[in-house]
Structure formats: C-alpha cells, structure tokens
Amino acid sequence: MSILTASEKATASKSDRKILCFYINTTSQVQVIRITNSPKFNFERVIFPGQREMFEAGLEGFLEVCTETNSFFIPCQQLSVIES
C-alpha cells in the first residue's frame, strides 16, 4: 500500500480526468484523427469531409489530425464540449 502526497494526488487526478470533445472535418480531404499524449485513451478514426466526431480524451491529450499532405495537433481542451 502506498500513500500519495497532496501534489501526487493532484497530478494523478489531473491525468485521469477525462473530457468530452467534438471535432468536425471542415476540409475536402479524408483525415485520420488520433489522440496522443494520453496513454489511457486509445482512439483513432478515419473522418470523411463534413463528418463530425465526439470522443473522450484525457485533459492533457492532443488530437493529431493527419491528411495526405500534412498533420497537425489540436489540444483536446480546445475541442471540449461544455455540458449544461
């Protein structure tokens, strides 16, 4: 049995926290999206032009968006859905 300090608890709870995210492929190209920097969340999809996707990710995760010609990263916090 291990005892966590307050800072270890804060770090653990932050890395375990998940958020609901929403992404739309607004391009005319097929994209492959995947969550990176979040080992507890395994997610990869092929997204067609105009397609929408909701997914859960870790608070510190990034969505990697790949097309035939390039790739870029979006912080999942920027894609988070505000639930009311």
Image (cartoon, rainbow, N blue to C red):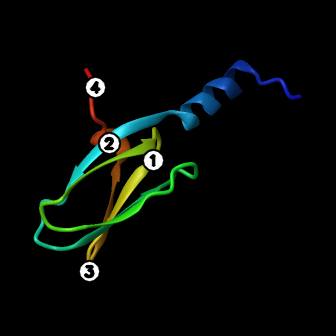
Closest to the observer, 1 or 78: 1
Residue at the disc numbered 2: 21
Query: In 3D space, how far apart are the residues under numbered discs 2 and 1 (Cα atoms)?
Result: 11 Å
Query: In 3D space, how far apart are the residues under numbered discs 2 and 3 (Cα atoms)?
Result: 24 Å
Where disc 2 sits, the SS reads: strand
Q: Going 36% across and 45% down the picture, which residue do you hit?
A: 76
Residue 44 horizontal/vertical position (percent): 41, 63
Looking at the image, tell me whether mark 4 or mark 2 is earlier in sequence order: 2
In the image, residue 2 above or below residue 63: above
Residue at the disc numbered 3: 68
Q: Amino acid at mark 1?
A: Gly
Query: In 3D space, how far apart are the residues under numbered discs 1 and 3 (Cα atoms)?
Result: 23 Å
Labels 4 and 2 touching (C-beta < 8 A): no
Looking at the rendering, in which quadrant would you find the C terminus? top left
In the image, residue 66 above or below residue 51: below
In the image, residue 21 above or below residue 47: above
